[in-house]
Image (spheres, coloured by chain):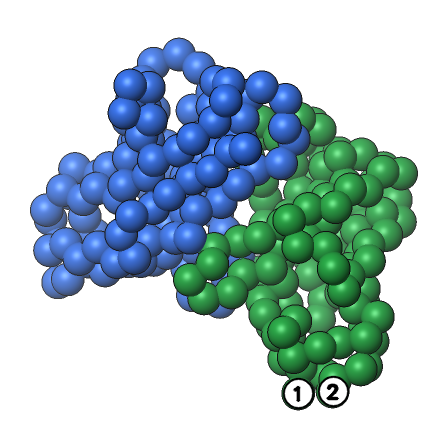
Chain colours: A blue, B green
Amino acid sequence: AQSVAQPEDQVNVAEGNPLTVKCTYSVSGNPYLFWYVQYPNRGLQFLLKYITGDNLVKGSYGFEAEFNKSQTSFHLKKPSALVSDSALYFCAVRDGGGYQKVTFGTGTKLQVIP
Amino acid sequence: NAGVTQTPKFQVLKTGQSMTLQCAQDMNHNSMYWYRQDPGMGLRLIYYSASEGTTDKGEVPNGYNVSRLNKREFSLRLESAAPSQTSVYFCASSQGSMGNQPQHFGDGTRLSIL
């Protein structure tokens, strides 16, 4: 069975500092990995995905994520945090071995402090 | 661009009442999904439809039914609402039917069962 873990319920970072939101996964085949962001009272918005290819994936709003197969991780990063980045972030995984369903993590609240 | 539209946005029901949550997408997507979001539990898949005419159970289908009315519309029905079904419900859609494409989400229906 596939699973995904976001070990931090909340991450606090000062504006202008780099940010990292952690995600680890477990699948039986090759993973399809996604990051989404959710602002208050809104649905999730797609940020970026990894299917295959370069381990560093660039996405919307200056976010990027690094795929690490040996550590089964897909951490979300941004070089310089903005107050407007404060939101709830979800990692998601789909097992490339054949499942159609995507499993979402429990979410990490990012708080960027001015 | 409307994307994914959910109605209603808010609803309060009494235990035992029934209701249908409506979802429509205008992106010509094959796959559609219903999730519920509860604090600390992330998104849990209730039902999904990989293509018009097909539906399958997700992680938490008990107490719910769905109808894929046509390619655009995917409705979720609560036949006899229970307080445990108090949640925020999200509809999503994606291109293709293999779960390797990003999902597009509506802004949710906030449902309270008294």
**Point 10% across, 46% down: residue:** A17
Query: Percent x, y for residue B76?
Result: 78, 59
Q: Residues within 10 Å of mark 2 (few under 14, many from 20)?
A: few
Q: At 57% across and 53% down in the image, what residue appears?
A: B44
Quadrant housing residue B11: bottom right
Q: Position of residue A16 (x, y in %)?
A: 11, 48
- The residue singled out by tag 1 in the image is B114
Q: Position of residue A58 (x, y in %)?
A: 33, 27
- Dots 2 and 1: beta carbons under 8 Å? yes
Residue A80 x %, y %: 15, 43
On whether disc 2 and disc 1 are found on a single subunit, the reply is yes
Q: Is residue A59 left or right of residue B42?
A: left
Q: Chain of mark 2?
A: B
* Relative height, residue A6 to residue B28 (above, below): below
- Which residue position holds label 2? B14
Closer to us: B53 or B70: B53
A15 and A65: which is toward the camera: A65
Circle 1 — which element?
loop
Q: Earlier in the sequence, mark 2 or mark 1?
A: 2
Report, in whole angstroms, how far the alpha carbon at label 2 lies from the one at label 1: 5 Å
At label 2, which amino acid type do we have? Lys
